[in-house]
Image: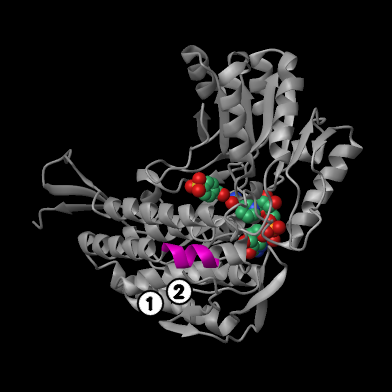
Amino acid sequence: MTTTFVNPALYVAGQWLEKASGGARPVFNPATATEIGQLPLAGPAELAAAAESAQHGFEQWRRVRPHDRYVILRRAAELLRQRADEIATVLTLEQGKPLAEAKREVVLSADIIDFQAEEAKRLYGRTVAPRVDGILSHTVSRVPVGPVAAFTPWNFPVNLPSRKLGSALAAGCSVVIKPAEETPASCMLLVRCFLDAGLPAEVINMLCGDPALVSSFLIERPEIAKVSVTGSVAVGKLLGEQAARHVKRFTGELGGHAPVIVCEDMCEGAALDFVLKQSVTAKYRNAGQVCASPIRFYVPRAQLATFSERFAAAAQKLQLGSGLDAATQMGPLAHARRIEDMERFVDDAVGQGARLLAGGHRADRPGWFFEPTVFAEAPPTSRLMQQEPFGPIAVIQPFDELDDAISQANALPYALGAYAFTSDLHTAHRLGESIEAGMVGINHFGVSQPELPFGGHKESGIGQEQGAEGITHYTEVKTITVGQPF
Ligand SMILES: NC(=O)C1=CN([C@@H]2O[C@H](COP(=O)(O)OP(=O)(O)OC[C@H]3O[C@@H](n4cnc5c(N)ncnc54)[C@H](O)[C@@H]3O)[C@@H](O)[C@H]2O)C=CC1
Ligand SMILES: O=Cc1ccc(S(=O)(=O)O)cc1
């Protein structure tokens, strides 16, 4: 297995580019904060070429039968599985997460592509009975929306592109994808799987550059029909506004601030052990850089001390280190900006009187490591209780009545993932129905599955990815109605 980095290149109009007109920027290993590669950056010339190429690619791909699209996508998923060790290593080198997490991400991405490939064959239409004589047929079908501009972040550099590419390509769209500049190489290796599987060259274009320039340039291009973004609420609003100005279709998978309600009946003995083990694992997975990461834990007031002390003790025991080291349980944050952001969250929470129970500092070692951090009783005005920390910070809050916990859970404009633990079936249903979120996990954190729709309510997003819903967002409804000629 290789432990070397693969220098990233852009893929524009059927050519791999190791240099581009926008210059270049370094790619870093977050575990050491050292440069590991150079990324070429697209300028207007490559951006225009990519948009034109996506139009050519679309004209070709839309005519490929769904079954043939399915065959190519299934082959790409298989190549991804075969290359999982190499791709996971590159992912860990540029993003930082433990290798086992990176490998799971790559294999899960193959499952996502497989599922969407199957959906290509199930884009059913319908016929509708005419209401007057002289009409032969009304046919309602789904057609591909057109070339897509897709923007993905650095926290899941293979999974998030796979969600967009799997659905868009299955639907018959071409894609110009801009992965995060911090983590371009693992996405490049994903793109190679599609091309090696037989995807026609111009159906996919991949480039990086100045994010604001790339997005505004592409969204304004007449070739681009749809914009799909995963990122912060702020970036989602910006790109959504730009798309709306041109009446372009838009999917946004944006931030979250997931609450976790732990009911009284889960606060003792084996039940409490179970909740704590699941919670600490879910919280510090990918160093908390997950849009559906649990953030606010609500526990009965009488259990606050025990729950928070045990949570903090478990967090402090986590082994930090390079993702390539098999003993590592939590890697570094993906880039230096995240460390500064964590410090701002901590300073603000401490300043507002929250109790710091664990961590709170950058770790005393090279690289962008931040200690697993636990707060209790943070005031609702603190930044931590209002904005997505997107890092290894948990906050544990007391509640008196379950209704109060539900109100607090629903108090923010975010509504992506939410979780609750209870052994009571009636309470499980009540929580599932009353918590406002796109995805509610009861007694587990595994809300993201290839078979299930993933998406948020309120400001957390528009549309869904994965599941049967994923592909539909890359289609338009078209009605053809045929009358008798005379
Ligand atoms: N929903 C998710 O999975 C993600 C959410 N975020 C959120 O974003 C916050 C800030 O993340 P940072 O990386 O520090 O900041 P950032 O906002 O600079 O970048 C976030 C991502 O958006 C992209 N981006 C930024 N401006 C863009 C633009 N005008 N057009 C197209 N893409 C653009 C970047 O390339 C990057 O991949 C995090 O605290 C978190 O709340 C970040 C990454 C993933
Ligand atoms: O950041 C969003 C995100 C990405 C991946 C997953 S999972 O690996 O499929 O669980 C969850 C959330």
Q: Residue at x 45, y 74 (%)?
A: 205
**Magenta stretch?**
84-90
Tell me whether the residue at label 2 lies in contact with that at label 1, contact meaning CB atoms closer than 8 angstroms. yes
Is 319 on the left-hand or right-hand side of 20? right
Amino acid marked by disc 2: Asn
Residue 410 image offset from top left, x and y in percent: 64, 28
Say whether residue 89 is magenta: yes
Amino acid marked by disc 1: Glu
Say whether residue 274 is magenta: no
Query: Along the line of sight, which residue is nearer the eye, 186 or 173?
Result: 186
Q: Residue at x 59, y 43 (%)?
A: 460
Identify residue for label 2. 205
Residue 255 image offset from top left, x and y in percent: 62, 46
Is 60 on the left-hand or right-hand side of 9? left
The quarter holding residue 451 reads top left
Q: Which mark is residue 223?
A: none
Indicate the quadrant containing the C terminus: top left, top right, bottom left or bottom right. bottom left
Residue 370 visible here: yes
Identify residue for label 1. 202
Disc 2 and disc 1: Cα gap in Å? Answer: 7 Å
How crowded pointer 2 is (Cα within 10 Å; few <14, some 14-19, many 20+) is rated as many
Residue 193 image offset from top left, x and y in percent: 38, 69
The quarter holding residue 376 reads top right
Query: Along the line of sight, which residue is nearer the eye, 467 or 266?
Result: 266
How crowded pointer 1 is (Cα within 10 Å; few <14, some 14-19, many 20+) is rated as many
Q: Is residue 363 above or below residue 459?
A: below
Q: Main secondary structure of the magenta part?
A: helix
Q: Residue at x 82, y 30 (%)?
A: 379
Q: Is residue 123 above or below residue 26?
A: above
Is 415 on the left-hand or right-hand side of 199? right
The answer to whether mark 2 is within 8 Å of ligand 1 is no
